[in-house]
Structure formats: structure tokens, C-alpha cells
Image (cartoon, rainbow, N blue to C red):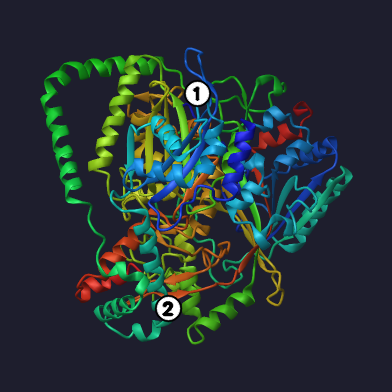
């Protein structure tokens, strides 16, 4: 383990998870899940987890990984049990696919906006800002629509910004149809299940409440040395990686509740919170929940803007109910009522819980370390408005994005 | 919740007042050499520490300790680990420096006090006097007792005679939170903040008591401390205390005005006001964007969202808009929720400027802030509001006045019609000369720290 940790530290120092541009990888990371015991005292061995937020097919990404990051895989996963002896691309790829864990719920800040698009639009914005700086006094004398036109002409003259002459392409029609069908079918099925729900939901609520009364929240503060180690790796970029692990509370009720909640998050993230905001929190790029070890544990991982303190405050102030629903099935979580009440409203207890379950992210790569989700959204709006016909009013509004 | 009634006789007066009637002040940071001497000195100070209940007098004395100071008094480690992690880590530790932006030429190794190269900062005594002679008498008395107890002066922070303008020439100290039980009832406007945001042992903005040191009963055999109101049976060392942030911030007054002149030779005041967010009189730009109106000089009852969502009156990145964004941030800018969210990151400011002489190159502010949660209040304001290049949707600019400059945060944008003006490579106008996190104990806690039983 210490050799692996040292290897990861080395990888981290050389940004070992970076991919050549243009890339379809937004974020990538390697995380050690330390050895642990489950609620019955059974040991759970240590795991090494690779997570990436990628555009397109994950199998494509794994294939790329097997080909272009062979050395990284061999020097890290090579230390895992059953990693192939015969180290070739095909074996690595097969091993990766057989060890792949699907997300049980996932959030994407803006569905359909690729990593290379994000990087391109950032370049576009830089170029326009520079153009405004260089010609500020002349441009400031013009009407807004004329400034828009001048910027448009300037961008036309930049061959490496040719993409900006058109709005970003929408996702393929087939994909949109599939999403629309999914959006409708799930509620329809749920409506059909209402009679079952009428019987079971009150029962579930009463049982859950009984569990909540019995559950024992953690009261310990996080280990200071652990917090210092976590702080050591935070706040290097505009955003940070977050990872945490928790043990699901004992019993089938909690397990089923967790599964149901993650299903609901999955649906909401896909159809409701799919453009710029997760229930009011605008600082998350990607987030995911994954069951591990036969539903005994859940890993949560995200990429968020700003400091952890501001991330936690955002959560507590804006979506405490959602946090409670998502995490109160974890052993030791602050006391909740009816799944969504209290819990994270106990600020300090929640912050302690989070830090106590947080994991070091040994290696992390971001394709655009200087951008927040708000920046990215603003850049996209700049690109969209650039190629549109704008009247004076709309042009003035567009110029306020710069 | 069974929270105690605010006990003004146990709270140091600084939580209630900046001692505006005592215009002369000196802050002295001491190093303790022996635990016994330190306790003797503290015991002497305990009898002279001014509580919030005191009537106006010709002097006032306040006392605060760093973690190292508590160690020097031989306070048991079990007691120390109950303080907040930011406090026990210390302002000059690498992890805090990086977070606060005290890096590069602002690194604690360059500081005049509080850094690793300087005498240890243990004990802070803040002395106030109605006139210079009274202050001098008080300070020499304190120093004599310190010397007699082998307590050395680590640094002496003289302050300039109190005035309402900071060294750059702008009215200062206008925006103070209105706190239940602490603020005089007549001022200021706005929903009052809960006492527990500033004083430990009272409900905070979340209706909870902030974490604070509770000692097991045997660590306080003399029952100097009050019992924990939450019924743990322990002795409440934190009750009526607060965390005190002290930072000596040098202001480059000549550099500031030279820069302003280089950018806007024929409208210096106007441009400087864009950076600050107020006119020299204190009038906020959001209320009067084109003209300094003195009658608005102490105006503090305003928001940003309704009048100026885009920063056309007061730039988004202007100093006062960052230091207190009021109603301009998520959720729902312009709403009371937005104000409530901002209000979870407020500070009671009790600083004094230094360097009276306009010709002196050493002028600035001994910044003093009080709060119950260093992480959620002081450090958040410093990191996520003042220093963050991404504040409120911006890209690459920190606070033009008080922010730490890095290559990623040296711009300043003044939003304007039809297009914004952007300024590059702002020089640094404020530099950190020293600082430390202190704990400002309640009066009984001061006596506890001074007592033999803490050993």
C-alpha cells in the first residue's frame, strides 16, 4: 500500500492522468479506498478506484486508457489482485471492463456540453476580451449592435476560432428522443404503481421513523491530521475533487431506501437538474453515487467550485433536504426526521460527518482547471450570442456577458 | 434550547464596542517565558479586563491568547484540542497561509510579527485610553507587571488617533453587523444577527451552539468556570468567548494614488471610488454612482440587486461589494434568503489604523475581527469573497484593495455601457505585516487560564 501511495504521489506530481487535446475527458482521478470493516465486523479490503467524467462512450474511454495510459495502469492497478499477468492492450481493456462499476446516480452540470467545447469556448472568450481591451476606446463609441458586429468580424478572422461561427451542435436526435421517452415513461410507471404506494408508503414512513429514532449519530470531530492532509490537496484550481465513502445503515429498509433515493436522484439529474444547477447549487460540475461491496457501502464523488467550506455551506443552506435524503442512510449521519428534515441543518455535525468520511484523492486531473461552472455557462452564452443576429437591446445584453 | 442569557459582566467589552470614546489605543503582543510568570501576569490583567457591562471610563483593557500562549501557560493538551481547528493550526501555518493568500512576498516568513522568525505571539493586550497620557500610564503599568513576571514584549502595535477615515482616505468602519444583545439598539439597520455568531455559548445562525472547549469537571476543581448549559456536566471554557483575528495590513498610500492617477489622471477620485465601492465620504456608489454625496456618508441600509444587478453603478469586484455582498449572491439575489446566506459570513470589525504621519511609509490597519467560527466567517470572507478570482461570476480578479494578488487575480473590471473597462496587473496596495488567531475569553475563562488549577 505504501508503495502504491508513493506511486500515486509521483503520478500526481506529473499530472499523470492528463490526456492530449482535444480531449473528451473532463476530470479523471485515482482514489484509494482504505481497508475497512463493515457493520458486522467483516473486513473489506482496500480498493483502488479510477473515476473519470468523459464524453461519449465509457468503453471508448477505457479502450483509450488501455492504449495510452498503459504505464499508469500497470504501475497502479498492477498492484491489485488479478491484474493480468500478460500485459497487453487487449488484456488491460478486458480487465478494466470486467472491474467497471456503473454509477447508481450521476449529475452532470450541463448535459451534452463536451470537454473540448468547454476549452474552445474559453479560448473564444479570451480572444474577445483581448479584442475589447485592445480597441476599447474606439468600440466604446459605437452602438451595442455595431460592437457585436465588430467582434463577429474579428472572430471570423481567427482561423482557430472557426467553431464559433455556429452555435454548439445539439445532442443527436436519437439521444434526445430516448431521453424524452425515458422522461415520460418513468412517471407513467409510477402512476400505475400509485395503488401499491398508497399501501406501502405510510408503512415505509413509519418504519423509517422508528429506525431514525434508534439510529446513533456520530459525535466525534474529524481527526485534525486527516483534515490537514485533505486541506493540503484542496484549493489548487478553481474547482476541487471531492470523494467520500459511507457504510449503509443495517437492515433491508435502509438498503431499499438508499436504492430508491439514488433512483430518484438519477431521474431528477437526467431530466430536471440537467442545466447548470443541482437543486439550486450551481457550483458542481459532475457528481456520482456508486454502491460498492454488495450494497454495503456508497461512494460519492464530485467536482465542485471554490473551497470545501463554501461547498458545505452551499449544501446546508440550499439543499439540506436533498443531502439528508441522499446521505442519511449512511451510518453515523446527523439525526434526521422523516428522511429529509433536520440532519444537515445541524451545521457542525454535518461538516464533521463529511470530513470524517472524506477520502484523499491521490491523483486528479482537470481539463480546465481555471474555470468555474458559472464561467463555463457564461462562455457558452457568449458563443451562442456571437453567431446570432442581435438587435440593439439584445446586443447590449450580450455585451454584459463580457 | 437551554441557552444562557447574555452575560455582559463576563463578556469582554470589545464584543459590544470598538471603544470609540477612547481614541487612543495600543495593542501589545507578549511572549511568556514561564508558565508561573504568565499566570501571574494574566491574573493581574484579569482584575483589569473591561467587561461589556462596564460604564464608560478613561481606559479599557482587553486580553486574548493564542494557542501557543495557552501552551506557554501549561494548559493541558486535552483542553486545547477542543478549540477550533483553524485556531489550533494557527494563522501562520502553511495550510492557512495558502488558504488566506499569505503567499509569495506575503508569506509569514516576511512578517514583522507573528511569523516563524519572530518571537512567539502568546498574549495580546489591547489597551485604550481617553488621551495619550492616560494610555501611556496604563501601558507602562502593564509593561512593568509583564517585566516583573518575565513576560516579554513580542511586538508593540501602536495605533493612530481614532478617526473615521482609513489611510487611503475613505470613510471606514461603516458596515458592522447588527447583533442581538451586542449592538446598541438605535443602530444599525437590518435584521439582527444571532449573538452566537460572535459569542460562543449562544445559538448561532443555525440555532446551534458553536463548538467550544468544554472541560471535564475535574479540570476545574475550583469551579471558576460556569457549567455547560447543554448539561454535559463539564465546565464551559468557551462561554462568552470569541475568536479574535488580528492582522497588521500595511497600506501603500502613495502607490495606491500613483496607480489611480496613472489610470485616470483627470478623474482620480472617481476611479478610486470604483475600486472601493464607496466615495471618500463613505457614500456608496450603488446609491450615488456619479457624485460623492456626503449626506450618504454613513449609509449602510442598501442592497445591490434591485439598483445594480450588473455592476454598472458599483463594480461587482469593488472592495465593499466583496467584503459584504449583501443581497447580490445566490440563492435568489435580491431576496431575504440571499441576505441571510451572506449574513452567515459576517465579522465584527474592531481594527484601528496606524501610522499617523502622512509622510510615513508605514501606514495601514491593525485589522481586528471577532467571530465565533473562523472557518465559516473570517476565513470564508478572506478566501471566497476577497481573494477569490471567481467571486460572483468573475474570472480573474481579486479584491482591488485588500485582495492577495496572484497572476490569476490581478485584473479589475468596471462594468459599463456599452462595454466594460478592464484593467490588468493591478499592483498590490495592501501587504500583510503580521497576524495571529487569538481567543478572546470570557472574564471567568481569563481567570481560569490565570489559575494554578489549569496545570
Say which residue label 1 marks.
A218
Q: Residues within 10 Å of mark 2 (few under 14, many from 20)?
A: some
Residue at mark 2: A133
Q: In the orientation shown, which residue stands out farthest toward the top?
A: A40
Q: For this rendering, which residue is in front, A246 or B354?
A: A246
**Residue B344 spot, x, y in % from top left:** 45, 46
Residue ID at (28%, 48%): A111
Seen from the viewer's position, the closer of residues B139 and A395 is A395
The percent position of residue B30, horizontal first and vertical second, equals: 78, 48
Please state, as top left, top right, bottom left or bottom right, where the C terminus of chain A lies in the image: bottom left
**In the image, what residue occupies the spot 55% across and 37% down?**
A76
Secondary element under disc 2, as helix, strand or loop, is helix
Q: Nearer the viewer, mark 1 or mark 2?
A: 2
Specify which label sits upstream in the sequence, 1 or 2.
2
Left or right: residue B10 versus residue A305 is: right
Question: Where on the picture, by quarter, is residue B199?
Answer: top right
Amino acid at each position: 500500500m505504501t508503495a502504491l501511495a508513493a506511486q500515486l504521489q509521483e503520478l500526481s506530481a506529473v499530472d499523470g492522468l492528463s490526456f492530449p487535446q482535444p480531449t473528451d475527458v473532463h476530470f479523471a482521478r485515482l482514489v484509494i479506498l482504505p481497508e475497512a470493516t463493515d457493520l458486522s465486523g467483516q473486513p473489506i479490503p482496500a480498493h483502488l478506484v479510477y473515476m473519470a467524467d468523459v464524453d461519449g462512450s465509457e468503453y471508448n474511454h477505457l479502450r483509450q486508457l488501455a492504449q495510452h495510459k498503459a504505464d499508469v495502469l500497470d504501475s497502479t492497478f498492477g498492484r491489485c489482485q488479478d491484474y493480468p499477468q500478460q500485459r497487453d492492450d487487449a488484456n488491460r481493456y478486458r480487465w478494466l471492463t470486467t472491474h467497471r462499476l456503473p454509477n447508481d446516480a450521476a449529475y452532470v452540470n450541463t448535459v451534452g456540453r463536451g470537454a473540448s467545447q468547454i476549452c474552445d469556448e474559453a479560448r473564444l472568450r479570451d480572444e474577445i476580451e483581448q479584442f475589447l481591451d485592445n480597441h476599447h476606446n474606439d468600440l466604446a463609441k459605437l452602438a451595442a449592435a455595431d460592437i457585436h458586429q465588430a467582434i463577429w468580424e474579428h472572430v471570423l478572422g481567427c482561423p482557430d476560432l472557426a467553431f464559433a461561427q455556429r452555435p454548439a451542435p445539439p445532442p443527436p436526435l436519437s439521444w434526445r428522443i430516448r431521453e424524452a421517452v425515458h422522461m415520460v415513461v418513468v412517471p407513467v410507471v409510477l402512476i400505475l404503481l400509485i395503488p401499491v404506494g398508497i399501501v406501502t408508503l405510510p408503512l415505509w414512513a413509519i418504519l423509517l421513523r422508528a429506525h431514525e429514532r434508534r439510529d446513533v449519530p456520530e459525535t466525534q470531530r474529524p481527526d485534525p491530521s486527516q483534515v490537514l492532509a485533505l486541506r493540503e490537496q484542496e484549493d489548487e484550481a478553481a474547482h476541487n475533487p471531492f470523494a467520500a465513502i459511507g457504510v449503509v445503515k443495517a437492515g433491508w429498509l435502509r438498503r431499499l431506501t438508499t436504492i430508491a433515493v439514488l433512483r430518484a436522484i438519477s431521474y431528477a439529474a437526467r431530466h430536471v437538474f440537467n442545466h447548470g444547477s443541482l437543486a439550486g447549487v450551481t457550483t458542481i460540475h459532475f457528481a456520482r453515487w456508486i454502491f460498492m461491496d454488495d450494497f454495503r457501502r456508497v461512494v460519492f464523488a464530485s467536482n465542485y467550485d471554490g473551497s470545501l467550506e463554501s461547498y458545505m455551506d452551499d449544501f446546508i443552506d440550499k439543499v439540506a433536504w436533498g443531502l439528508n435524503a441522499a446521505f442519511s442512510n449512511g451510518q453515523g449521519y446527523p439525526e434526521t426526521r422523516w428522511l429529509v428534515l433536520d440532519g444537515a441543518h445541524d451545521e457542525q455535525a454535518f461538516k464533521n460527518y463529511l470530513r470524517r468520511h472524506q477520502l484523499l484523492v491521490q491523483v486528479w486531473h482537470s481539463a480546465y482547471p481555471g474555470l468555474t461552472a458559472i464561467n463555463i455557462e457564461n462562455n457558452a452564452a457568449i458563443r451562442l450570442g456571437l453567431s446570432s443576429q442581435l438587435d440593439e437591446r439584445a446586443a447590449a445584453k450580450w455585451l454584459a456577458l463580457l | 434550547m437551554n441557552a444562557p442569557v447574555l452575560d455582559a459582566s463576563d463578556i469582554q467589552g470589545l464584543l459590544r464596542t470598538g471603544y470609540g470614546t477612547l481614541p487612543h489605543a495600543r495593542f501589545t503582543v507578549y511572549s511568556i517565558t514561564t508558565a508561573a510568570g504568565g499566570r501571574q501576569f494574566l491574573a493581574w490583567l484579569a482584575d483589569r479586563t473591561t467587561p461589556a457591562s462596564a460604564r464608560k471610563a478613561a481606559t479599557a483593557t482587553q486580553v486574548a491568547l493564542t494557542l501557543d500562549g495557552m501552551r506557554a501557560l501549561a494548559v493541558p493538551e486535552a483542553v486545547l484540542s477542543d478549540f477550533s481547528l483553524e485556531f489550533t493550526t494557527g494563522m501562520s501555518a502553511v495550510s492557512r497561509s495558502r488558504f488566506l493568500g499569505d503567499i509569495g512576498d506575503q508569506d509569514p516568513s516576511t512578517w514583522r510579527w507573528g511569523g516563524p522568525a519572530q518571537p512567539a505571539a502568546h498574549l495580546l493586550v489591547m489597551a485604550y485610553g481617553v488621551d495619550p497620557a492616560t494610555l501611556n500610564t496604563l501601558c507602562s503599568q502593564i509593561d512593568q507587571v509583564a517585566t516583573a513576571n518575565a513576560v516579554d514584549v513580542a511586538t508593540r502595535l501602536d495605533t493612530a488617533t481614532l478617526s473615521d477615515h482609513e489611510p487611503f482616505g475613505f470613510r471606514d468602519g461603516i458596515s458592522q453587523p447588527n447583533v442581538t444583545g451586542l449592538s446598541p439598539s438605535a443602530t444599525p439597520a437590518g435584521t439582527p444577527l444571532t449573538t452566537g455568531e460572535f459569542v460562543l455559548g449562544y445559538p448561532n445562525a443555525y440555532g446551534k451552539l458553536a463548538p467550544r472547549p468544554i472541560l471535564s469537571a475535574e479540570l476545574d476543581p475550583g469551579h471558576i468556570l460556569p457549567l455547560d448549559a447543554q448539561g454535559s456536566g463539564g465546565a464551559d471554557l468557551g462561554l462568552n468567548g470569541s475568536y479574535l483575528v488580528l492582522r497588521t495590513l500595511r497600506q501603500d498610500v502613495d502607490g495606491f494614488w500613483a496607480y489611480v492617477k496613472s489610470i485616470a489622471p483627470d478623474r482620480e477620485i472617481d476611479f478610486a471610488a470604483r475600486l472601493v465601492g464607496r466615495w471618500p465620504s463613505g457614500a456608496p456608489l450603488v446609491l450615488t454612482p456619479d457624485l460623492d454625496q456626503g449626506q450618504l456618508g454613513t449609509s449602510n441600509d442598501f442592497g445591490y440587486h434591485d439598483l445594480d444587478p450588473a455592476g454598472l453603478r458599483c463594480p461587482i469586484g469593488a472592495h465593499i461589494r466583496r467584503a459584504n455582498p449583501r443581497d447580490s449572491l445566490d440563492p435568489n439575489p435580491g431576496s431575504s434568503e440571499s441576505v441571510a446566506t451572506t449574513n452567515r459570513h459576517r465579522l465584527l470589525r474592531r481594527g484601528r489604523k496606524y501610522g499617523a504621519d502622512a509622510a510615513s511609509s508605514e501606514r495601514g490597519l491593525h485589522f481586528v475581527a471577532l467571530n465565533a467560527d473562523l472557518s465559516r466567517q473570517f476565513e470564508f470572507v478572506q478566501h471566497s469573497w476577497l481573494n477569490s478570482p471567481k467571486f460572483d461570476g468573475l474570472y480573474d480578479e481579486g479584491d482591488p484593495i485588500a485582495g492577495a494578488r496572484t497572476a490569476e487575480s490581478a485584473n479589475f473590471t468596471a462594468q459599463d455601457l456599452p462595454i466594460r473597462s478592464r484593467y490588468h496587473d493591478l499592483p498590490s496596495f495592501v501587504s500583510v505585516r503580521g497576524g495571529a488567531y487569538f481567543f478572546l475569553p470570557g472574564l471567568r475563562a481569563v481567570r481560569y487560564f490565570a489559575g494554578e488549577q489549569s496545570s
